[in-house]
Amino acid sequence: MRNLIAILLILTCSALTFAGESRVSTMGFHVGILPDDNANVYLFPQTINNFKFVQFEGVNTGSPDYMLIVGDKGDRWGLYGGWDERNDFINIIKSLNEDAAVQLGVRLTTTSIEAKYDNNEDSPGNASESLTNKYKDISITGVYGFNKGDAEIAIGAGYIQGPGLIDALVGYPWNYDGPHGSVTYESTSGTTTQTDEGEAKASSFGVGAVYRRPFNFLLFENMFASFNYSKGSETSQFTMDGDVDVEDIELSGSNLSATVTFFNHKNIPIESKYIKNTLLVYGLGADLESYSFSGDVKLPDANGDLKNSAEASESDFMIGGPRFHLGVEGDMGFLNLRFGLMRMIRFYSKEEYSQDYPAYPWYYGDNNGDTYEYSESGIGQGGYYIFSSGIGVELGNVQIDLILNDDFWVSGPQMIFGSSWGTLGVFADVTYTFGDK
């Protein structure tokens, strides 16, 4: 259950914070420091006025994401989607004028499950079972992006509501493990009927903003900043035979993040037979992340009353930085060669966790009545370093971007012509630009 909350918290503001695209992933792993890349449409909706194309992202996956942008500057429409949005009613970006646009995503689905089993044998032990399960899946996200002077700004909010999980139903009946909404299970044996009822729900709400503008700082001429906050909860209750409460669970969590990145984005002319121009991108940034989680699991006492609780809590805090981005793109005419990396250390981090076990050996085994606490903190630990390379092939109005397999630089010819080493690339995008932007 806790994992679902974490997913909801991330998804709520995903439109503001993430854009997966082959060129971005090989030029420093940060779309915010690549203002000329069409992936900015996911971050700043108003940049729809800078592009006009149809794109298939991740064609090698068999179910690529897509985006279509058409219309005149200041009156453009963008349609986007993919596997994650397959149940959405609306996924659009619409420019309001040359400096402003809105992005809207709406999903509203309902599911109703009814199942029944009858033992029709002519005997006194006739039995029947029936199950009903009804739940909703709602998602509403909106982003408003606008330019103010030389600054680009986008502000968004999102709400998600979906089914949860009733632990008491996992594995029964008929191994029905969820998802669960409003559930009724009825079983009859002879003249005896038992009715069990339960309900589960998960929801999350989040807000976020991104900001980019020219800004002189040390070696850098631009800055990018982001802020996100989201809060989620999940609950589940289950009652057997009308009056025996066996489950009452409440989980909640919140997540706050803020980033700032100073960067340069420069074209460097090169007099070379093979390379016409080189794009150099580099940035330096820092992150702040704070996550908290609490859970309360009520358990029945000897009388069947849910009075005792097993409680858990967790908190994580991290100041990340310095975070360094570097990307180089060499223009060789119809072919672009790219190299990029990102490196960050966790300047300070702290993690705390606690768990109380009630005195119920039948539920918690040998841990009944115990308390567990854990705390860890450190400076300069848990850093990471990632590197990627890629190529871009431009054939008229068609652009193909490919993330290269890391082993390509070890055994490239074998990979091109086929061998046990794998394939040439691991992710590919295809973009067709409609004439002049």
Image (cartoon, rainbow, N blue to C red):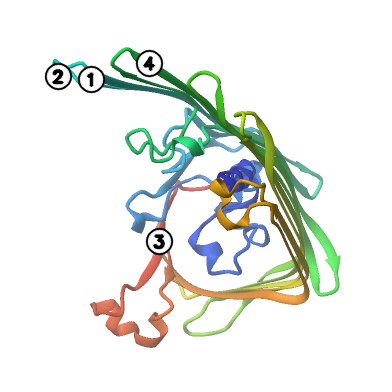
Which residue is at a point 63% across and 48% down the rendered structure image? 43
Work out how far the residue at label 4 is from the one at label 2, CA to CA, in angstroms: 18 Å
Q: Secondary structure at mark 3?
A: strand
Kindly report the distance in space between the C-alpha atoms of the residues bearing marks 1 and 4: 13 Å
The residue located at (41%, 56%) in the rendering is 58
Spot the residue most to the bottom.
Answer: 410
Q: Give the Cα separation between the discs numbered 3 and 1.
A: 61 Å
Query: How crowded is the residue under tag 1: few (<14 C-alpha within 10 Å), some, or many (20+)?
Result: few
Q: Quadrant of residue 367?
A: bottom right
Q: Is residue 357 above or below residue 282?
A: above
Q: Nearer the viewer, mark 2 or mark 1?
A: 1
Q: Residue furthest left?
A: 122
User: Mark 3, residues whose alpha carbon is within 10 Å: few (<14), some, or many (≥20)?
Assistant: many
Residue 197: percent from the left, percent from the top? 49, 22
The front one of 375 and 164 is 375
Q: State the separation of the CA atoms marked 4 and 3.
A: 58 Å
Q: Amino acid at mark 4?
A: Thr
- Residue ID for mark 3: 428
Answer whether labels 2 and 1 touch (C-beta < 8 Å).
Answer: yes
Which residue ends up furthest to the top in the rendered image?
191
Question: Disc 3 to disc 2, how far (Cα)?
Answer: 59 Å
Which mark identifies residue 121? 2
Query: Which SS class for mark 2?
Result: loop
Q: Which mark is residue 193?
A: 4
The residue identified by callout 1 is: 125
Q: Earlier in the sequence, mark 3 or mark 2?
A: 2
Q: Of callouts 4 and 2, which one flags the residue occurring earlier in the amino acid sequence?
A: 2
Q: Is residue 74 visible?
A: no
Q: Amino acid at mark 3?
A: Ala
Image quadrant holding the N terminus, namely: top right
